[in-house]
Amino acid sequence: MYGDFNFFDMKTTVEDNIKTQEKFLKSFESMMNVEGNLANQTPRELVFKEDKLKLYHYNKQATKVSKTPTLIVYALVNTPSMMDISQDKSFIKKLVESGLDLYLIEWGYPTQEDKYLTLDDYINIYIDDCLDHIRKENKVSKINILGVCQGGTFSLMYTALHPEKIKNVVTMVTPVDFSTDDGLLFKWGKYLSPDTMVDAFGVVPGDFMNTGFLTLRPISLMVNKYVDVINDLEDPDYASNFMTMEKWIFDSPGQAGNAYKEFLNSMYRENKLAKGEMEIAGKKVDLKKITQPVLNLYAKKDNQVPNAASIPLKDLTGSKDFTEKCFPTGHIGMFVSGRSQKEVAPTVVEWLQQRS
């Protein structure tokens, strides 16, 4: 019908399709056979427990270790294992090897019995009890606090309420001014109805949180993520790293109802912390009471915590020793990229050691 003109070579097309399917199946098999989890491999010991919370102390690895311990406070969403993924990329390992005496809070997984937990419980009980344990164990009156994302917001509130226990403050990709409309989460957060969700669930399920956040991402990005890695999944090391990160992304603890409601209403909807109107257990949280040295680190390409939410911190605290630095990476890249190893972690260590 079309003479000698061939629209395509059927034989070549079929062969290419077979090769592609074989490669996909081989990669899928490699992914299914990945052994082990590359997260949380930096040696540590459980030193304190309270309800679901666990406090870990990392084994000292440097010949010269800072005399002032540092406590990492992570967000309630996801787990802090992202900071210790793969030993050649581990942010935590880099800090420990560089001489920090490091502790970390793991919040655990709330159940229905935890639905009445409030921000007061997290800040004035859980964080405070961890601080007291570390201070007593090390026989010091003050320690450093390093807050990540929402954990940074918690760290700022804690320091404002208990300044006598904190020596230096480090905040990383931390939101403090929630008035910005930059970023989907900050636009979305203002219109959420946390009261309805908490009434329905008690403890808002992590799967529900993941589903909600994933609907904000173009489906093409989700599909392309897997298409792009097919060629590399035959490499066992790459596959292990990929699956470890995937596990972290979808490993979202539930959110204790009252605390979740309180945080969304006070921060995203009313921006009380930046306005100086935030109260915890009836006590005003005044960021001007933070007179300790502050290091504020944020990511230029952060699509979760906009720069506009982090930068205002400088004008909100009472610190006269305030340092801020922006890195040309993303939210997660602050902790798992080559730049994290070469620039971000060394910045934290050097700044703290100069002040400890």
Image (tube, rainbow, N blue to C red):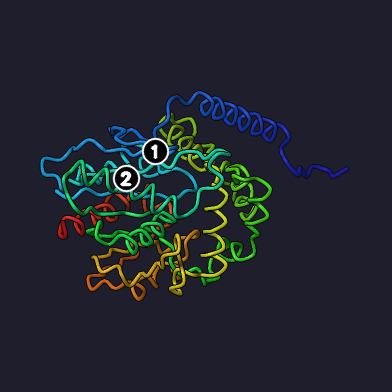
Residue 214 lies, in percent from the top left, at 61, 50
Residue underneath mark 1: 50
Q: Position of residue 314 (x, y in %)?
A: 33, 73
> Which of these two is toward me, 164 or 88?
164
What secondary structure is marked by label 1?
Answer: strand
Residue 130 — which label?
2
Quarter of the image where the C terminus is located: bottom left
- Element under disc 2: helix
Spot occupied by residue 45 in the image (x, y as percentages of width and height): 28, 32
Is 209 left, or right, of 37 in this rendering? right
Q: Position of residue 189 (x, y in %)?
A: 59, 62
Count all numbered tags in the image, as a single digit: 2
Q: Quadrant of residue 18?
A: top right
Left or right: where does residue 286 sit relative to residue 111?
left
| Cα–Cα gap, marks 2 and 1 | 9 Å
Q: Is residue 174 above or below residue 109?
A: below
Left or right of residue 69, residue 186 in this image: right
Q: Is the Cβ of the residue at disc 2 closer than 8 Å to that at disc 1?
A: yes
